[in-house]
Each structure stands twice: as structure tokens, then as C-alpha cells.
Image: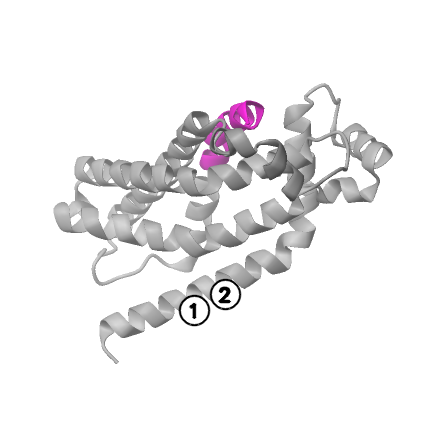
Amino acid sequence: MGSYGRSYKNLCWYLFIKRENNLIGFPFEQPFEAAKTIWQAEPHWKNEVTLSKSIVERYGLAGFYKGSIANCVRVATKSLYRYPLVMMFQGIFDRLFPGMENDTRTLTLVKGLAATCVANAESVIVCPLERMKVFFMTRNVFSGGYLQFFHENIHVLRKELFRGLGIHVARQNVSWFVWLETDALTKMYIRKKYHIDPFTQQIPFTLMLPLALITSIINVLAGNSALIVCSDAI
């Protein structure tokens, strides 16, 4: 089997495992996603405890699973396209700008271009699912369902599904740009500091773990404001 065949097989296995991991953890993550979305739509709650009590009083425990179908599809879909999109755009810009590993300016440009392409593509894919997720999570009553949603908005369906797309694009651009730039620059710093050849050597796990933590914290801090604005808009 050639290198292309091996790469394709590895990619398929990665996507399968990633999807299964997301789906296995979904029942435990859904209540937190629902509480987060409801709190962003109803910011007057004092803390997590009062918000949770309100959800239980209004909807029962089922309130934590409002919009779960749309959210489950969103989570499963993300695991299928994210890695291929990043690899595709990264490969395109790697060929256009060779030897960027040791050039900070070129690396920053390439990561920024890749972030923009991935963010714009992801926004178009995810926005309808995000819209339905927010609609059902923040709805005050359990009635109808997804068929009713489509029936009520049949004449303005495209507009309704893509409500807040512009803000969603901005949010995704912030998130992807911060993540890819921070990831690339921190790895470049570590390689230079510890004399790690980017072509023949890998960064040790003991260094990758704190790098991943730093990148995640910066990304969460940078993207949180955009996330709140996006939830309000849709």
C-alpha cells in the first residue's frame, strides 16, 4: 500500500475514533452545553446553582437535553470535517509557502490564511445546526419539534437557518486564528529553545502537554466574548 493509501486509511480511522469518542461523551456534555446556552440567553441568573434550579423547575431534568438532536448532529459532523479541512488548507499553503517552519512572518501569514479558510467553511456548515440548537435550548415550552420548526419557517427557512451567520463567521475566525497562530508560535519557540528539528524530530510529550494547555486557555479567553455575542444573535 502506498503512502497515500496509508494516509487515507489513517485518516478514516482517526475520523471514526474521533466521532465515537464525541458520541460516547455526548450524554454527559449535553447538560453543560444546554446550561451554557440558556445562561447566555438569560444572563440575569446569579450563578450555576440558581440557573440549574430554574431549568429543573421549568422543564424538569429533560430541560438539560433540550436541542440534543441538533447538538448531537453538530458534534458528530464537526468530528468528520474539521481535521480534513485543516489538513487540506494547511497542505495548500505549505506548498505555496515552503520552508515556513523557521520564518515567523511566513508562518504567521500561512496560519492566518488557513484559519480564515477553515473558519469560513465551518461557519456555513455549522450555522444551521447551531441555530436549531440555540432555538430549542432557549425555547420556553416543549411543543412541536423539528418538523414544526421547519413548518413555521418554511417561507423564510434559509434566512432563519443562517441567522447570525456574519457573527458566527467572526467568532469562528477569532477562534481558529488564535488557535492556529498560538499553536504554531509556541511550537516554533519550543523547537528553537530545545534545538528540535521540525523535519526530523517531534516535540516530546512532556512539552506538548503544557503547550496544548496554554493554547486552549488562550483560545477560550479570546473566543468566549464572540461566543456570547453569537448566541445572542441567533
Q: Is residue 132 above or below residue 5?
A: above
| Left or right: 225 in relation to 43 | left
Name the residue at the top extreme: 44
Q: CA distance from mark 2 to mark 1?
A: 6 Å
- Write the residue at 31% across / 60% down: 202
Which one is nearer the viewer's eye here, 36 or 181? 36
Q: Percent x, y for residue 141?
A: 77, 32
Give yes or no for residue 119 being in the magenta stretch. no
- Residue extent of the magenta highlight: 218-234
User: Element under label 1?
Assistant: helix
Name the residue at the right extreme: 57
Q: Amino acid at mark 1?
A: Trp
Residue highlighted by disc 2: 17
Res 47 label: none
Residue highlighted by disc 1: 13
Q: Percent x, y for residue 52?
A: 78, 34
Q: Do tag 2 and tag 1 residues touch (Cβ < 8 Å)? A: yes
User: Element under label 2?
Assistant: helix
Which one is nearer the viewer's eye here, 89 or 141? 141
Q: Percent x, y for residue 124?
A: 41, 39
